[in-house]
């Protein structure tokens, strides 16, 4: 009995469709001790374990903490440790004293075996034989007699047949961490990318393992941490780490014996919507993906409909809404309103979610991961136009049109002025800014932000910055400085360059699309950033035999040498624990996305000229604590569909704008990365739902039009930190004046992505902090609903088991 909830998302290696749903059966009334929403950092389920004295190295002082072990999905999870020996780098790699971390499946309560762990998929290895290769000469304890450790998948498919068999995971999608640095004080930290059974069915984490008809039992998985010291598996002491290194795999017997394993409890990922329910398609903006896939399981049983979801451009969503009929009902998610043709069926717009875009990054400095950067509109304009030397194919000498420009942003004087504390890292480590492919309202928002800033606009038009840097001339001709409708990220530089590491006589070349490939969508950008690899393919690789031509391959950077930035949605940045850049807004304030800064920007928005019921994002109005890349996503639905479909979509809107605005990680709640809708927008959503169900929009909706001075109703006591940095005095004016740079003095932002959640802020009562509903309030609502049912004569059962199966977003 499965209902299909779908939305499309490409993977790095293969495009796959995802099916997301869950059956939710809730015991009424709720127990008085209902658990509050888990904190976004997951510390309520943190587990700490110690290492042990090994055969050659003593890890008994090592203490490793996994900061969330329950309620997991595909996400980032923080891992910290103390009591370790300082990592010794050399030859571009970590050579001794580091931690290797991998995700494993396994139903044995004692933990996984090494054949159940995802490791050896990376094309870049720390040392010789660091994948799944075994060698008895290097590890006398290795008694298997096999040349490698096969990977045995959870789904029953055949085990791998060789050490570097990429059937299940490979260089572009493995989540293994080969080497994590321990600093001089004995501590270290990382954010590990977990994959659930929807993303990686070969792990099966969260898949139901109980027989059909039984209480679901989601498969738990494991995080395996293998500490490495300064001895090889055969006891050889590495005394010169600058020229020598550990060369055996963490899966080799002696090393594997030192593993520290953590059980991981995943949310249910199987589909169990009641069989035979009407399926109601929805389509549109990726900004609502995390929210909608959280709401789906609750809606699945509370409305009698199964709501599918397809992530697509807002433009496609609007066209489908206009093509709605009784034979093809749908609901679309959009930022800009649907332009309703004169005389055509009416379309209602209901605000559903407040979120936005972010510049998420993963940059490793000499002392660890960088947590704080600031970006001006002009710096972003330089990145988007590939105006740095490192952002175009590498020729000798560099191409004429960028030859006089800095190699990369890390040595750009402007970047250094607004980031005076940024560590010194080699320019060659930086990768081009990752951007999504295709057209989107949110892409237009990014260009509008740049066009609203005098400095960025002048640079795009061809005016050099104060240090003499000019825009890549191939982009100047596109008139990006004035095209207010631009909704894609062009890559028009035609430069060709010889493949890196090409042998003499090779004619293999690469292009800007090989150097800076698009991401499939915003979420994939977050995944690539988390892995520290933009998936570029610029390195020469010979064919498997002389008859096969050479090809371009990915040159994944080694641990400690990664520097990537990506345009992502705020929810994806939160999901994978990525820090986000502080962006300079219209009055020069550097602001990060948080609940307060998102809502502060909503309060500046004015009604759209195309539809006064829809608020239009306008970065030129973002001042003070307003985050300039904020957007409100609307559910748009035509009244030109049958009464049953209109009623179902109206119920969807009421839930999403009501209980669905309660921040939390449980099914039906609002995930991190969103700010709850202000009261006025909730009222507008309720009005739109009533109009849709009735089939005739009212001329004077309850609640009235948005207040022009405070249309979003923000500033209602939401927490989460202002996230602002008022150091940028002299920034561009709302009218697009000649903006100025920031001063060096800065107040620290109160909320940073990767620490307190933008949607959550400090953990506290959800109603007080978010205008949401506490568990007690939700219980009261449910009791009134139950009372109404009883009055109508229905029979309600007040006992039985509580079952909750969650549907979660499928990642690439």
Image (cartoon, rainbow, N blue to C red):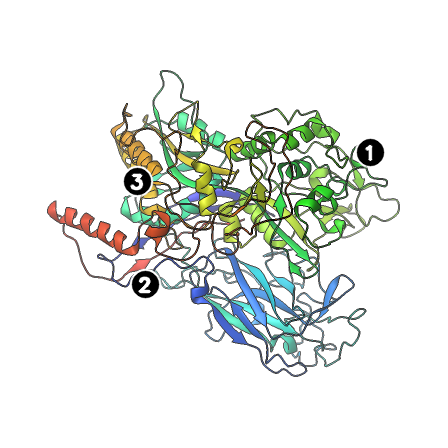
- Residue 353 in sight here: yes
Does dot 2 land on a helix, a strand or a loop?
loop
Per the rendering, the mark at residue 248 is none
The image shows residue 667, relative to residue 482, as above or below, that is below
Q: Position of residue 153 (x, y in %)?
A: 54, 62
The quarter holding residue 56 reads: bottom right
- In the image, 548 versus 809, the foreground residue is 809
Of all residues, the one furthest to the top in this rendering is 343
Which residue bears the numbered disc 3?
654
Q: Is residue 209 above or below residue 551?
A: below
**Pointer 3 or 2: first along the chain:** 2
| Residue 321: % across, % down | 40, 28
Category of crowding for the residue at label 3, using alpha-carbon neighbours closer than 10 angstroms: few (below 14), some (14–19), many (at least 20): many
- Measured in 3D between alpha carbons, the distance from the residue under mark 2 to the one under mark 1, in whole angstroms, is 68 Å
Please report contact status of discs 1 and 3: CB closer than 8 Å, yes or no. no
The residue to which callout 1 is attached is 400
| Left or right: residue 224 compared with residue 713 | right
C-alpha distance separating marks 1 and 3: 58 Å
- Of tags 3 and 2, which is closer to the observer? 3
Which of marks 1 and 2 precedes in the sequence? 2
Residue 22 position, x and y percent, is 36, 52
Quick one: SS at disc 3?
A: helix
* Residue under numbered circle 2: 214
Residue 193 sits in quarter:
bottom right
Q: Is residue 394 left or right of residue 801?
A: right
């Amino acid at each position: 009995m499965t209902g299909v909830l779908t939305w499309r998302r490409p993977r790095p290696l293969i495009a796959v469709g995802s099916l997301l749903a869950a059956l939710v059966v809730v015991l009424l009334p709720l127990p008085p001790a209902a658990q509050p929403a888990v904190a976004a950092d997951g510390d309520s389920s943190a587990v700490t374990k110690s290492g042990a004295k090994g055969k050659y190295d003593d890890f008994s002082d090592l203490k490793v903490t996994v900061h969330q072990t329950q309620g997991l999905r595909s996400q980032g999870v923080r891992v910290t440790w103390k009591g370790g020996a300082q990592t010794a780098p050399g030859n571009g790699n970590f050579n001794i004293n580091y931690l290797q971390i991998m995700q494993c499946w396994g139903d044995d309560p004692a933990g996984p075996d090494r054949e159940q762990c995802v490791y050896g998929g990376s094309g870049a290895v720390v040392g010789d034989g660091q994948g799944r290769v075994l060698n008895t000469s290097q590890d006398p304890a290795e008694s298997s007699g096999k040349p490698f450790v096969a990977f045995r998948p959870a789904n029953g498919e055949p085990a791998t047949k060789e050490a570097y068999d990429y059937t299940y995971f490979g260089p572009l999608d493995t989540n293994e961490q080969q080497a994590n640095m321990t600093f001089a004080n004995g501590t270290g930290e990382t954010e590990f990318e977990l994959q659930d059974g929807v993303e990686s069915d070969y792990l099966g984490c969260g898949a139901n393992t109980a027989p059909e008809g039984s209480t679901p039992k989601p498969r738990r998985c494991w995080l395996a941490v293998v500490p490495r010291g300064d001895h090889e598996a055969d006891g050889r002491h590495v005394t010169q780490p600058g020229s020598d290194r550990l060369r055996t795999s963490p899966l080799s017997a002696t090393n594997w014996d030192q593993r520290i394993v953590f059980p991981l409890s995943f949310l249910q990922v199987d589909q169990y919507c009641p069989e035979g329910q009407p399926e109601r398609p929805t389509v549109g903006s990726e900004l609502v993906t995390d929210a909608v896939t959280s709401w789906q399981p609750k809606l699945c049983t509370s409305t009698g409909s199964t709501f599918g979801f397809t992530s697509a451009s807002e433009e496609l969503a609007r066209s489908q809404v206009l093509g709605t009929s009784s034979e093809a009902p749908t609901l679309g998610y959009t930022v800009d309103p649907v332009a309703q043709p004169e005389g055509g069926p009416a379309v209602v717009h209901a605000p559903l979610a407040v979120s936005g875009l972010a510049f998420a990054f993963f940059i490793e400095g000499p002392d660890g991961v960088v947590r704080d950067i600031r970006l001006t509109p002009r710096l972003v304009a330089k990145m988007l136009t590939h105006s740095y030397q490192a952002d175009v194919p590498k020729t000798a000498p560099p191409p004429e049109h960028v030859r006089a420009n800095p190699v990369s942003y890390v040595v750009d004087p402007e970047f250094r002025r607004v980031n005076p504390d940024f560590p010194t890292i080699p320019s060659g480590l930086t990768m081009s800014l990752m951007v999504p492919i295709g057209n989107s309202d949110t892409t237009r928002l990014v260009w509008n932000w740049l066009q609203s800033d005098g400095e960025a606009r002048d640079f795009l038009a061809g005016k050099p910055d104060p240090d003499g840097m000019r825009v890549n001339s191939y982009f100047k001709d596109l008139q990006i400085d004035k095209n207010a409708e631009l909704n894609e990220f062009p890559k028009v530089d035609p430069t060709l360059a010889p493949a890196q590491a090409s042998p003499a006589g090779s004619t293999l070349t690469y292009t800007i699309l090989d150097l800076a490939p698009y991401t499939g969508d915003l979420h994939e950008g977050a995944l690539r950033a988390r892995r520290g690899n933009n998936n570029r393919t610029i390195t020469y690789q010979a064919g498997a035999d002389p008859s096969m031509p050479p090809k371009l391959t990915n040159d994944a950077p080694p641990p400690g040498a990664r520097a990537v930035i990506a345009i992502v949605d705020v929810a994806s940045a939160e999901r994978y624990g990525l820090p986000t850049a502080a962006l300079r807004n219209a009055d020069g304030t550097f602001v990060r996305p948080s609940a307060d800064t998102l809502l502060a920007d909503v309060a500046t928005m004015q009604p759209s000229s195309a539809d006064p019921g829809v608020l239009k994002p306008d970065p030129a109005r973002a001042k003070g604590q307003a985050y300039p890349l904020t957007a409100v996503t609307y559910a748009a639905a035509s009244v030109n569909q049958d009464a049953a479909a209109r009623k179902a979509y109206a119920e969807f809107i009421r839930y999403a704008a009501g209980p669905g605005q309660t921040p939390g990680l449980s099914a039906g709640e609002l995930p991190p990365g969103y700010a709850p809708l202000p009261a006025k927008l909730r009222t507008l959503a309720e009005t739109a739902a009533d109009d849709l169900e009735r089939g005739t929009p009212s001329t004077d909706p309850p609640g009235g039009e948005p207040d022009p001075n405070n249309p979003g109703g923000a500033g209602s006591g939401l927490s989460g930190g202002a996230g602002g940095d008022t150091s940028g005095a002299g920034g561009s004016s709302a009218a697009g004046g000649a903006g100025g740079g920031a001063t060096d003095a800065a107040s620290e932002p109160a909320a940073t992505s990767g620490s307190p959640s933008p949607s959550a802020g400090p953990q506290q009562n959800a109603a007080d902090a978010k205008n949401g509903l506490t568990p007690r309030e939700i219980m009261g609502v449910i009791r009134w609903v139950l009372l109404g049912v009883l009055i109508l004569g229905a029979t309600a059962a007040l006992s039985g088991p509580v079952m909750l199966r969650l549907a979660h977003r499928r990642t690439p």
